[in-house]
Image (cartoon, grey):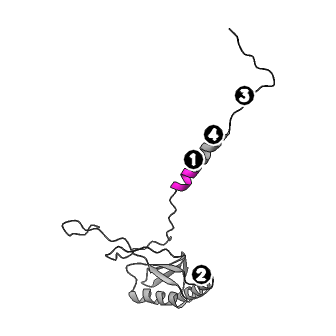
């Protein structure tokens, strides 16, 4: 029986290529499975349109919500603004992103006139406005709506 002896200069080398491959595959898996959902930080109850339509995502998000005293709160990209400030933000943004989409989230309790005023301000600056809604509720066979 013959035993092999190692010489002093000979070492076993760990092959790092498979280890690097596994690490990269795990990194890609977690990056691609991550949920990249961009939603505004202001919680609103969007109306349901009763039909299914296409969703348009804008570069900027304007959110309208009723305040505690019944006044309309305006958020431009999650920052509270006054109506005059909103007009100024729209003018500045139109210089950078003319003819881009703006997503408008309006709470169910916000008046129709307030929504139309904001739409008018945005379209005056050349923006296209997409009004966000909830998905339509599915009706069961008995005709009753499910919450």
Element at label 4: helix
The quarter of the displayed image where residue 4 is located: top right
Name the N-terminal-most of marks 1 and 2. 1
Residue 7: image x %, image y %? 79, 20
Above-or-below relation of 95 to 55: below
CA–CA distance between discs 1 and 2?
37 Å
Disc 2 and disc 3 in contact, CB within 8 angstroms = no
Q: Residue furthest top?
A: 1
Question: What is the magenta range?
Answer: 28-33
Q: Is residue 79 magenta?
A: no
Q: CA distance from mark 3 to mark 4?
A: 16 Å
Specify the label residue 18 is tagged with.
Answer: 4
Distance between mark 4 and mark 1 Cα atoms: 12 Å
Q: Position of residue 37 (x, y in %)?
A: 50, 64
Can residue 102 be seen in this snapshot? Answer: yes
Label 2 CA crowd tier, 10 Å (few <14, some 14–19, many 20+): some
Which residue is found at the position 34% from the left and 77% from the top? 49
For residue 26, the mark is 1
Q: Nearer the viewer, mark 4 or mark 2?
A: 4
Which tag, 3 or 1, sits closer to the chain's start?
3
Residue 131 on image: x %, y %: 43, 79
Callout 1 environment at 10 Å: few (<14), some (14 to 19), or many (20+)? Answer: few
State the SS at label 1.
Answer: helix
The extreme left residue here reads 142
Q: Nearer the viewer, residue 27 or 109?
A: 27
Q: Quadrant of the C terminus?
A: bottom left
To which residue does mark 2 refer? Answer: 97
Q: Earlier in the sequence, mark 2 or mark 3?
A: 3
Q: Residue furthest front?
A: 2
Residue placed under numbered mark 3 in the picture: 12
């Amino acid at each position: 029986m013959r035993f092999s002896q190692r010489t002093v200069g000979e070492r076993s080398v760990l092959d790092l290529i498979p280890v690097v491959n596994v690490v990269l595959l795990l990194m890609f898996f977690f990056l691609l499975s991550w949920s990249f959902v961009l939603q505004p930080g202001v919680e609103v109850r969007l109306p349901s349109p009763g039909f299914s339509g296409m969703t348009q995502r804008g570069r900027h998000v304007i959110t309208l919500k009723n305040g505690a005293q019944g006044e309309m709160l305006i958020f431009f990209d999650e920052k509270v603004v006054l109506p005059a400030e909103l007009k100024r933000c729209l003018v500045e943004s139109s210089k950078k992103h003319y003819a881009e989409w703006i997503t408008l989230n309006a709470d169910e309790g916000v008046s129709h006139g307030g929504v139309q005023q904001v739409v008018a301000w945005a379209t005056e600056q050349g923006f296209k406005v997409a009004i966000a809604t909830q998905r339509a509720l599915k009706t069961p066979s008995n005709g009753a709506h499910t919450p």
